[in-house]
Every structure is written in C-alpha cells, then in structure tokens.
Image (spheres, rainbow, N blue to C red):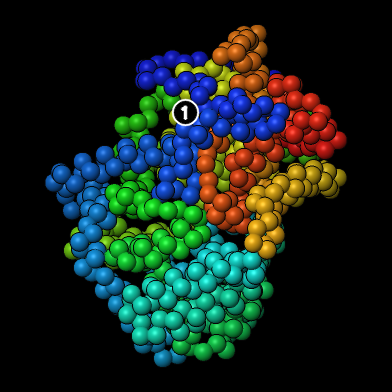
Amino acid sequence: MMSAAIVLSACGPKQAKVPAIDLTNLDTSVAPGDDFYQYATGGWQKKNPLKPEYARFGTFDQLSETNVERLNDLFAGMTTMKTEKGTVEQKISDLYKQGLDSVKLNQDGAAPLKGILDRIYSIKDKNGLVELVADMHNSGQGGFFGAYVGSDMVDSDSQILNFGQSGLGIGDRDYYVKPENAALKEGYRAFLEKVFALAGNPEPKKASMNALAVEDVLAENSWDSIKERDVEAQYNVYSSETLQKSFPGFDWNAYLTRRGIPEQKKLVVGEPDFFEKFGVYFANEDLSILKDYLAARVISGAASSLSDDFYAASFDFFSTQMSGIKEQKPRWKRAMQVPNGILGQAVGKMYVEKYFPASSKEKMETLVENLKIAFSQHIDELDWMGDETKAKAHEKLDNFIVKIGYPDEWKDYSTLDIDPDKSYYENILAARKWSVADNLSKLGKPTDRTEWGMSPQTVNAYYNPSTNEICFPAAILQPPFFNPDADDAVNYGGIGVVIGHEMSHGFDDQGRLFDSKGNMSGWWTADDDAKFKAKAKILAEQFDAVEVLPAKDGQPALMANGQLSLGENIGDHGGLSIAYTAMHNAIAGNDPGLIDGFTPDQRFYLGYAAVWAQNITDQEKARRTRQDVHSLAVNRVNVSVKNFQSFFDAFGIKEGDPMWRPESERVHIW
C-alpha cells in the first residue's frame, strides 16, 4: 500500500531563519550512548535556566511565550480603541483591563464573594444544599462531583449526560490518602484557613478543617488515577429514575430539575461505587461541615480573580509548594490568559489572520497524508496482528477526521455578556455560566463533529476517540516542531512524531477500544487483543523501572508510573516508529547525506529530542509523576528511543552503554 511520499521543502515567504539543529543546544561532553537526552538538549538547558516564574520551562513554553506576547499586543491594541458594546473586541478588552486593574481588585477585596457565601451559610437543610450544588455547577463552580454533556461512548452521534467523581481541591486522591503527602496536605489546609480568613469567616481554622474532612471522605471513595483510565469500567448506564434508586441520600431528581435537565432516559455514571458512598455520606454528614466545604470550593476557585492577598495565598500553595515556582507571573500575563481562555476562538480568529498563512496549512496537510501512508504500511507489516483486525485498523485510519490550523466556522459569543460595571470575578463567573449552558444545550442533539476542542493559538494537539479526529492547532506549526528552513529528517522528528503520536492515540490502550465512527466496540479478535495487552505491559514496565526522584528524608524513591502514562507512551512509541518510516519515504532516492555532520537518522532523533528540551523543578517532577498522564520529558526521550534499532545504529550505541536495551527487552507495537 505504498504511495509516493511528498518531500517537504522550504518555500514561500521567508522569515528569519531558525537553524534546523542549533548545535549550541547539544552537550557534546556527554556521549549519546550515555544519556541521549542530555547530549541532545543539555546545551539548551544551560542556555535557558529556569526562571523563577516557572516550575517547568521547555520548548512548548517558549512557543507559548511567543504567543503570549503576540496576544498581549492584540489585547493592548484593543484597550486604546473605542469598542462597541457586545462585540468580541469589547469583551476581550474589558476583561483584559479588569485583570490589569489592581487598584480596583484590591479595593473590592472579598466583596464579590459576599452574595454566594451569604447564601451558602443561610441554607437551612439538605434540600437547600442540593439546589445550591446544582446552581454552583450551572455556574462552573465545582463541588462533590461533576456532570457534563458529551458523546455517548457506544453511540457517538448522540450527546448524553455524564456523571463523574470530582470535588478535590488538590486534584488527585493520592494527596489525601498517602502518608508521604502529609506535608502538602497540611499546606493545603493552611491555604484554606488563610482564604477563609480573607473572606471574613469568623472561624477560619475550623472551616478549613471541616472542608478538608469532606475532601478526605471524597478522596477515600474515589477511584485512583490508574482505575480512572479504564474507560470500559466507566461506562455505566442509568436513567434519572434508576439514578435516584441506585444512589439514595442525594436528591438527584431535584438536582437535575434545578439544572434544567430533568427526566433523562439515558445517562452514564463513571464510578458507581463513588456515587453510592457519596449519597450515604451526604445524607448523614452535618450540614455545617458540608457548607464549609462548598464555601471552600467557591473561595479557592475565585482566588485568582480577586485581590492580591487572595492571589498570593493561592500562588503560595498551588504554585510554590506544589510545583516549586518562586515568582508570580507579571500581571499582564495573568490578565491576558483570561480573555484568551474565555473567548478562545474569537482570539484565535485574530491570531490566525495575522500569524498563520494558508501555506502553513497546506504543508501540514501534506505531512498528515505522509504519516497516514506510513501508518498504513505499518499496519500491513505487523507480525502480531491478524488480517481481520488489520482490516478494521485500516478502516479506522482511513476515517480519521483531520483538523488543521483553525475551524471552518468560528464559535459565536454574541450571547455572552461582559459588563465593565460588574466586578472582574462576576464577569468571569458569567463566562463560566455561559460555557456550562453552552455545554448543556447539546444534550439530546447529534454530535457536532466539526467542533474544535482546542483554540488555534494553543501550542498542542489532540486525538478525540469519540469523533475519531486528530487536531493540530495553528500555533504548533512553528520551530522546533515544524521549521520551513529545516530538512525533512528534522521536521519528521519534530512535527512528524507529533502527528504520528496523535494518530497512535487512536490505537493506544484506550483509543483502540473505539471504532472508525468513534463507538466503543469490540473490533479486535481475542487473540490480537491479548497480544496487544502483552506488548503494552512491556512498555508500561519500561517506564515503571525509572527512578524520578531518589529517596530522601525517610521517604521512598519516587518511580515513574508506566500504567498512568501508558496511553501517552504508546503515542510517543507509535509516533517515533511511524514518523521514521515517513521520513525515509520522503527522502527515498534523494538522501541529502550529512548535514552539520549528522546523517538523516541522527537528525531525526535529534529533532525529536529538541521538542522535549526543558528544565523542571523537583516539586514539579513529583507533581506531574503523580497526576499527569504524560511522562517527564527526559523519559519521553531516553526510555522511548531505546526500543528502536535504528536509534542504536544511528549513534553507534552498543551493549554495555547506558542507553542500550537488549533486543529481548524491546517492544514494537505500531
């Protein structure tokens, strides 16, 4: 099934040239066979010491910083022009100006919270509390659990209601239940005490302890992050009637009615045992304790939108204690993030008009097609998969929806009201409420497969199993991901692997469960299913063996979590494998030979490593290892490349070298 690959050469309007491989980014004092990540990125790390406003800074962040400056220029220009009420320009500029206005924010203090906090503490019974929870959820404020509208996993054309565990202020249950996290947990309690005091609570210490006690119960009953990755176990069908019968203790009918979505014939509950225990707990817990918990959720969620003392308290815990960030970002950066998030596509439209030429989209379309050709070749050549499953795999690959740059139709924000006479927090809350209403409006309607899950100015990419789509926003098509002045080997090692990574998500341990239409279905034969799981297990164990942080102060060494990061690791593994083939397809009959003293294979792997150059604090390493489904950058390089003979051959790596992995311990999936 091999087709002629298209070679991507630099053409079109020229901007300032960026070296394909910046030789100063290398650390040639280290041999590639000793530590390839250090060899390939050590010079970059030395040139880019971690700034105090970051817990992690890498090439992704460099691109994001460029975008921040671009967007800030756009926003600043709007503040000096007269904008008409109701236009996106008015909404962006007013939100931006309110975020910059420290005088007004500090004058307001906790006043914007007074109405909601007064309501919380005036509630007389559990019925009132149920209505409050529904109203909070309608305003995008968390509490106890989550509920949202999304695609039905077995009928992807339908939009249904989904319930999932939630309500933890620190995010992950392990922070609450594992003794090695006791210091961080106490730091969180102290943060709650601080913001309760700032909000005027007469007993802030008691309130913080009550709130934490509720979160402890929620955490104890929550699924851990590994179990949460079991998408089949999370598909549990109920109706509004059976929901109430199955999980008594919380008035689900009143909750759904208050949210404007009563009498659901079909809904999905992600973690039934969590909701069973929650209902019992809610019915029996003291009302005053539950009030303190909901007040904590409101105050914590508002802290970054209030006065400097609230923001400082939030920064001290969530940024400094949890991630090791030493310095707050300048106010203009924080201010521009808000309209960029709330009005993402409106901002994106302005961004692509100025910074994303049509030629870039054409180049990306060519790259995607080349990667699909290579992926198809790999499916044909798999020695572990049978013909029946291969046919279905080809069908899924052929039916990928590919989204590049920006959507064909932009989101309409005309019904979102941003009022400069209201407080900054009130406007942010109004935007959250608008977003929730937008989500709920999809309930019972056909799935819109044209909708985008990221804004064009986002430096990232994604795969969505329910729509079988891969999406590459405009902002990622820049060096080091894609460089119009670079040779094919470097570009395929960068953006090529990114494309292959997202395609491979359609065939990772979760994505593979969904067919070409995005429905969770059993399209694998039992034998092929078992072989896939055996190979995935080997990959997970490769990462499990990596020490992230050594034992310290009586605490055990922190090891990488290969099961938590399995999907992303399969994505990297598949991306490398497929992009390497696509690169060789592209240069077949036109091998450029040595460039900068490196062969195409060497440049491919150097291009891949360059994408992951970064510096990171130990606290952030620990936080991400516990919570993030992505492996740390060093492991995305050093652990992943050791499965490929082409890597060993490229750099002359042999048995006995630290980067060597015996063939018997390697794995090849896609």
Tell me what residue is drawn at x 38 percent, y 77 percent. Answer: 196
Q: Is residue 388 left or right of residue 48?
A: right
Tell me what residue is drawn at x 66 percent, y 20 percent. Answer: 601
Residue 320 in picture, x, y percent from top left: 46, 58
The N terminus appears in which quarter of the rendering? top right
Amino acid type at image mark 1: Pro
Q: Is residue 38 left or right of residue 230?
A: left
User: Front-most of 182 and 249?
Assistant: 182
Residue 471 visible (yes or no): no
Vertical placement of 63 versus 122: above or below? above
User: Front-most of 503 and 492?
Assistant: 492
Residue 456 in picture, x, y percent from top left: 41, 40
Q: Is residue 320 left or right of residue 95?
A: right
Vertical placement of 304 versus 527: above or below? below
Residue 131 in picture, x, y percent from top left: 43, 80
Vertical placement of 52 versus 315: above or below? above
The C terminus appears in which quarter of the rendering? top right
Residue 82 in picture, x, y percent from top left: 13, 46
Q: Is residue 389 left or right of residue 637?
A: right
User: Front-most of 183 and 93?
Assistant: 183
Q: Dot 1 corresponds to which residue?
A: 479
Secondary structure, mark 1, is: loop
Tell me what residue is drawn at x 36 percent, y 82 percent. Answer: 201
Tell me what residue is drawn at x 37 percent, y 54 percent. Answer: 328
Q: Quadrant of residue 490?
A: top right
Q: Quadrant of residue 462?
A: top right
